Amino acid sequence: MLASLLAVAVLAGCAQLQTDANRHGQPPAQPASTSIVDFVIPPDALGARDPQLTEVLGKVGSLAAKQPQSTTVVIAALAQDFPYLNQAVQRGIPARHGNIVNIENVTTGSCQPYSVQVKPTE
């Protein structure tokens, strides 16, 4: 169930977020075409180190490595969760592609959503 929820979040991603921002009269933070993947991590899945979440994060790393340009995986979470999240993403990155995928950690507050975003490196 978690995998299907994350798959829907990945597929719906930015378009859903932009629609909500536009509905409130606010400009979107960035164009939908900027992100390759953008989804929120369910806190209960992160807290339980859910195997399905680990699998999805590995697929995020694999997808980031398959892009024709260098990519950055931006992980927003509590600092204590970065080792797990980074390792799960790195497992999906083949060794020969490790130099074209950067991982950026952004510390969030405990009341803010945890998220993963893959975007072209600027």
Image: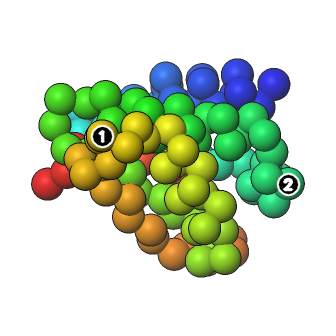
When the figure is inspected, residue 76 is found, relative to residue 20, above or below; the finding is below
Q: Residue 1, image x and y in percent? A: 81, 25
Where is residue 114, by image quadrant?
A: bottom right
* Secondary structure found at label 2: loop
Colour setup of the view: rainbow
Badge 1 crowding class, 10 Å Cα cut-off, few under 14, some 14 to 19, many 20 or more, is few
Q: Nearer the viewer, mark 2 or mark 1?
A: 1
Badge 2 crowding class, 10 Å Cα cut-off, few under 14, some 14 to 19, many 20 or more, is few
Position of 111 with respect to 119 (left or right) is: right
Along the viewing direction, whichever of 54 and 17 lies nearer the viewer: 54
Q: Residue 62, image x and y in percent? A: 44, 33
Along the viewing direction, whichever of 44 and 82 lies nearer the viewer: 82
Residue at the location (74% across, 55% down)? Answer: 46
Position of 30 with respect to 106 (left or right) is: left
Residue 96: which disc? 1
Along the viewing direction, whichever of 20 and 106 lies nearer the viewer: 106
For label 2, the residue is 48
- Amino acid identity at mark 1: Arg
- Amino acid identity at mark 2: Ala
Position of 82 with respect to 45 (left or right) is: left
Residue at the location (66% across, 35% down)? Answer: 55
Q: Where does the C terminus fall, quadrant-wise?
A: bottom left
Q: Earlier in the sequence, mark 2 or mark 1?
A: 2
Q: Residue 70, image x and y in percent? A: 19, 44
Residue at the location (31% across, 56% down)? Answer: 102
